[in-house]
Image (cartoon, rainbow, N blue to C red):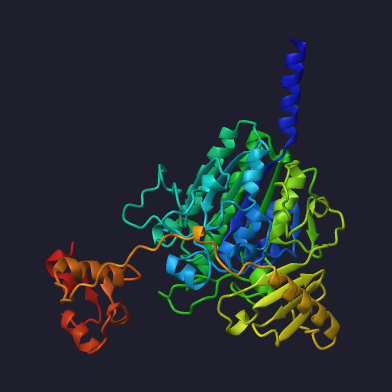
Amino acid sequence: MKLTLFLLALCSALIAAQPNVVFIYCDDLGFGDLACHGHPRIQTPNLDRMAKEGTDFWSFTVVNPVCSPSRTGIVTGQFPSRWGVHQHFATHEQNVARNMPDWLDPKAPLLPRVMKEAGYKTAHFGKWHLSGGNIEGAPLPAAYGYDDAAVWTGPGAHVFDGMKYDFAKGEGSAHDKQAASWISVAATDHALRFIREAKGAPFYLNLWLHETHHLVSATEDDKKPYPDVPEPQRTYYAAVSRADRQVGRVLDLLDELGITNNTLVMFSSDNGPENSHTQPGQKLYHSQGSTGGLRGRKRSLLMGGVNVAFLARWPGMVPAGRVDKETALAGVDVFPTVLAATGAKAPEGYVSDGENMLAAFKGEAQARTKPVFWWWQGGHSGDDWPAFAMREGPHVLILDETKQRAELYNVIADRFQTKNLATTEPERVKRMTTAINDWFATLPKEVDPSLRAKAAPKPAAKPSRPAEITPETRLRAFKNWDKNQDGHLTLEEYRNGLAKKDNVENRFKNFDKNSDGKVTREEFAGKAAP
């Protein structure tokens, strides 16, 4: 009897000794969007709290300047190009054109699976994007090692399923104006439920928020802290603060359950801030993120595209109030560092592109021993010109597609990349270029056919005939063309919606019965309009 009680007590002690892990990932959030990073107006009290109670790593970089490959680096601890993930997962046709699979190979080494095998409860709530949103045959999150999941931009249960939010009038997606203001709230609701249901068992949790990816939206309540801020900044600031509140909800629950000291919480963003549009109604009008002065934005291998916020809090283990501006952390380090922090064992034969940086988490000086490599295959205009990059210690080399244009920076001494050292340090440029070439030679160039959806056969072409135009079809067209959903079409909206744009002005005037420059539902659709 005594032996049984002793063993039960020992098991309970071992379970308690295993720290919980929470990884919160924002989407397109700029390094400079945090108040603790110097933003003069955005309120981020909960992220500021994380920085005060933990360590703020200023030299953290993700391993790709867009979503899917950045996230692949986190969950595999390997450069995403090793898995053929070069850009974001899109439609089957787009993925094929980019020489990408349709989803991340579930046979890859995966942090959630390792944690599950170590006895952890595992969950993923929020954005997925390790496959496209509507790819037939994409594996469910369970195939990657998650016990529980509710997502968007991915397969399986959606975060709104079974929740109190009613979006019957919208898409219920992150690109629907109404839903975009609540989708992270719903994901956080799931996360809080999961933490409560763990009931003392160790857990690994991904909470991947929507903010500040487009569609950037905010409710009137969200905007109340910013009454004097004009648009489009007001909506953007409100969205950042909404994401900050979700972080606060998690921190508060950890406090309530008495597990704060036994939980490693990490916060970051998948890449730098999105580019902005200048006119209301344009897709990225409300994308107003700040890089904090760093060059480049999303899709760029300049630091503004990959040097993002990274906060780590673990009371008693991670020093409080520390700002580390020198340690060269990278997204691929999360996997091996979490293993070191929890005692979980890596898969047999696993080789990470990252390294265990737990000493740096604990406040010790830790020099990086492995280089960081980037390969960007998207567009190469403007600040997006770099195709390849490498970091070695404080030095970052960036190259164009031809490898003829080279820029070299010491990003610790010269954070804003103003002094190109390529001409003064040609030997370093040569050596790092050779290292990039050697790394590139190790990458797979073909896609495993089993990782692609089978394209549906195209139906046989039928003789075309003019489509019947009814009040109902006009109403559907009206709803699609009325982009700002204000109940009328402008000439620009009407023109953009038409496939054939000849004689547009006269056709518009025929609908505009009262000649006020706007076409209402009734004017356009007649009896079909509500």
Residue 121 lies in what quarter of the image? top right
Measured as percent of width and height from the top left, residue 189 is found at 51, 44
The residue sitting at the right extreme is 365
In this rendering, the answer to whether 335 lies above or below 195 is below
Residue occupying the point 75% across, 28% down: 13
372 relative to 517 in the view: left or right:
right
Residue 292 visible in rendering: no
Which one is nearer the viewer's eye here, 218 or 111?
111
Q: Is residue 385 visible?
A: yes
Residue at 26%, 84% in the rendered image:
500
- In which quadrant of the rendered image does the C terminus lie? bottom left
Judge left or right: residue 248 versus residue 179: right
Quarter of the image with the N terminus in it: top right
Number of numbered discs visible in the structure rendering? 0
Q: Nearer the viewer, residue 437 or 161?
A: 437
Residue 502 vertical position relative to residue 54 in the rendered view, above or below: below
* Residue 72 horizontal/vertical position (percent): 61, 59
x then y, percent, for residue 275: 55, 75
Q: Position of residue 288 (x, y in %)?
A: 55, 71
Q: Residue at x 78, y 84 (%)?
A: 419
For this rendering, which residue is in front, 112 or 412?
112
Residue at the farthest top position: 1
Identify which residue, 468 or 470, lies in the foreground: 468
Instruction: Kindly give the residue lying farthest to the left in the view shown.
Output: 527
